[in-house]
Image (tube, coloured by chain):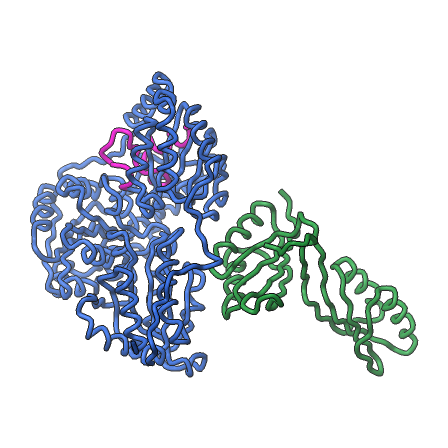
Chain colours: A blue, B green
Amino acid sequence: MKLKGAQILIKMIKEEGVDTIFGYPGGAVIDIYDALDKTPDLRHILVRHEQGAVHAADAYSRAKGTVGVALVTSGPGATNTVTGIASAYMDSIPIVVFTGQVPTALIGNDAFQEVDIVGITRPCTKHNYLVKDITKLARTIKEAFHIARSGRPGPVLVDLPKDVMGAMTEFEEPGDIDLRSYKPTYNPNMKQLSRVVELIKEAKRPVIFSGGGVVLSKASGELVKLAKMMNSPVTASLMGLGTFPGSDPLWLGMLGMHGTYRANMSIGNCDLLIAVGVRFDDRVTGRKDKFASEAKIVQIDIDPTSIHKNVEANCPIVGDCKNTLELLNSMLESENPADVCGNPEERQAWLDQIAQWRATSPQRYEQKDDVIKPQYVIDRLHKLTDKNTIITTEVGQNQMWTAQYYLFDKPNHFITSGGLGVMGFGLPAAIGAKAACPDKLVVCVAGDGSIQMNSQELMTAIESNLPVKIVILNNRYLGMVRQWQELFYDKRYSYTNMERAPDFVKLAEAYGAIGMRTDKVNEVEEVLKKGLACEGTVIMEFIVEREECVYPMVPAGVAITEMLLV
Amino acid sequence: MSNQKHILSILVDNEPGVLSRIAGLFSGRGYNIESLSVAQTAENSFLSRITMVTVGDDHIIEQITKQLHKLINVITVNDLTDKKYVQRELMLIKVNAKPEQRAEILRIVDIFRCRVVDVGPEHYTIEMSGDDGKIEAFIDLLRPMGIIETARTGLIALPRDKKKSK
């Protein structure tokens, strides 16, 4: 069968089980768009900026648990994807980004809209390709998807010169992918695992620490089972929220810079830390030598470079989180249950100690009846939505308050730019999540600063009929930077004042969305109820306390047990 | 943990951009490259061998090795440092050779078992190979004559055991 390069591309994307791609046309990809026009069964969502396409593909991937795809043109189209790619790289999200490129004969000649995107994205992709030979096209695309989704997932970029997309070739099925140099380790070392069993039996004060790897390997069920068997409290990084139910009594809350008092104190005092699918980011560990300093650390991760990178593990295990936890659980099941969940008195003393930390310093805010507290809005949002709601966030205070006050019960329902911290992520991410899960309610929690970074995507939501609900916590500041300026820079609010802002209600209306606003405490619930119940895309703007801070807070470089409390 | 020199023998796909991925990894993560030599292997034209000398404590070397492994185009990484291996470096050195210095230079060349590959009215170009200790000693001896310029390949190495290095 003779096919054009563009047809091969679309055929291969469809064979990967992808039903929706996010993109923006341009000169170098015009052949691909011409082929897309004849492919009604591959849905294309037209974004309004290429960055939005990549964030949407990222969220689509997370909400659906598959690979997300973005398609953009050469030059500026390609460079606009870099922030999105870097974010997916930091959060290990499997996406494939297809970029147009000038014809092969012009590469290197500084042609119109030419950029060396393979060179630019080398350090922020898991791998990338420039396809110069149409006979290698199908295989390269298949490899790209394979690399994106396997092992520690990540973004892969494929650069497609215009002439390769326009050329014809005899199509050949690429067959199975077997890369000699790339063989991720899925199955753990059994000897190491039996050491973990011994460590669990010896532990008096265990803590399980769950991260994004548990979401990616779909190991949440196994993690919950382990916690129940061990009767062990569980904390999670920002990326791990939802892997353990926020409503469970064993839940400690998030740990780290804005973690709960009890989570951070538990880390400081535990004697066994089982870390699953985490990379010990500096926002989690604080001062590294004081992190879990009394504990034996077990670290389970599919990526060997995550081990001994920031924190020395006593018992490192390279393997897929799900496979490893499954095996560990079955080994524990053959032990005496009483040994696995520890001495009842000691374990109760540990849980009592945690309850006491919780009582002495709960996560709290005080809602008086004059000004809306941002935490109150999140708290109400949590009460008014069910556990099937997908929440995306922007970055900054809005993100931290959501992590603290919205208790997630399921994985893949909290979508945030964790590692790179991209402002402008939340809205396109909400659109991507809605495209993946049209039957679920999708809410983007935003700040007044970050929503302005990609607000043009409102048009995408409207045009593509992907209704999302946007909650803006408007404090007329770049709140998180202002918080640092207040605490560490003598309140010199250098360029963080954002009093001059658009009228968000009118902005919504300008795009054909619904806009609502309130500054009254007693209207918060009503606005949320009304907004969430609307059919279409809605902006709900809440004028909140201007100088509210995110607490607890661990200042940079100190031990995570040395928190600034409210 | 002290900084130590490590010789890494890295087998990679012989493709455009691979060296850039490796160099980018080192610059992006703040690792050092002391020397680097790359060429296609004789046994398989789809593969290249990179021999790299890098410096770091055990923690950094462990990360370097693992990060290199993580690159899709890297097939094997072999740290030769604690193994038995042979190492060589090739140097071309151009040195002043006035008539009165010539005999002395040739004596040194003879002692070091290297050879003069080019002669000018007032200079010699000498080819020599050896481990870095030998090369440094040779340079030191020629320094008083006046070294005009040098070119060095960087270290290459292979393990001593018979089996193919992995």
Q: Quadrant of residue B46?
A: bottom right
Query: Where residue B141 sits in the image (x, y, percent)?
Result: 84, 64
Number of numbered tags placed on the structure image: 0
Identify which residue, A201 or A47, lies in the foreground.
A201
Can residue A440 be seen here? The reply is: yes
Query: Where residue B35 sits in the image (x, y, percent)?
Result: 64, 62
Can residue A449 be seen here? The reply is: no
Query: Where residue A34 sits in the image (x, y, percent)?
Result: 23, 77
Q: In which quarter of the image is residue A229?
A: top left
Q: In which quarter of the image is the C terminus of chain A?
A: top left
Q: In which quarter of the image is the N terminus of chain A?
A: bottom left
Identify which residue, A384 or B45, lies in the foreground.
B45
Q: In this view, does A425 lie to the left or right of A299?
A: left
Which region of the structure is painted magenta?
A242-270
**Residue occupying image coordinates x 78% and y 74%:** B94
Identify which residue, A362 or B90, lies in the foreground.
B90
**Residue occupying image coordinates x 39% and y 28%:** A206
Q: Is residue A292 left or right of residue A8?
A: right
Q: Quadrant of residue A322?
A: top left
Is residue A508 found inside the magenta-colored segment of the image? no
**Residue occupying image coordinates x 30% and y 72%:** A8
Query: Where residue A250 sits in the image (x, y, percent)?
Result: 29, 29
Is residue A248 found inside the magenta-colored segment of the image? yes
Q: Which residue lies furthest to the top in this view?
A: A345
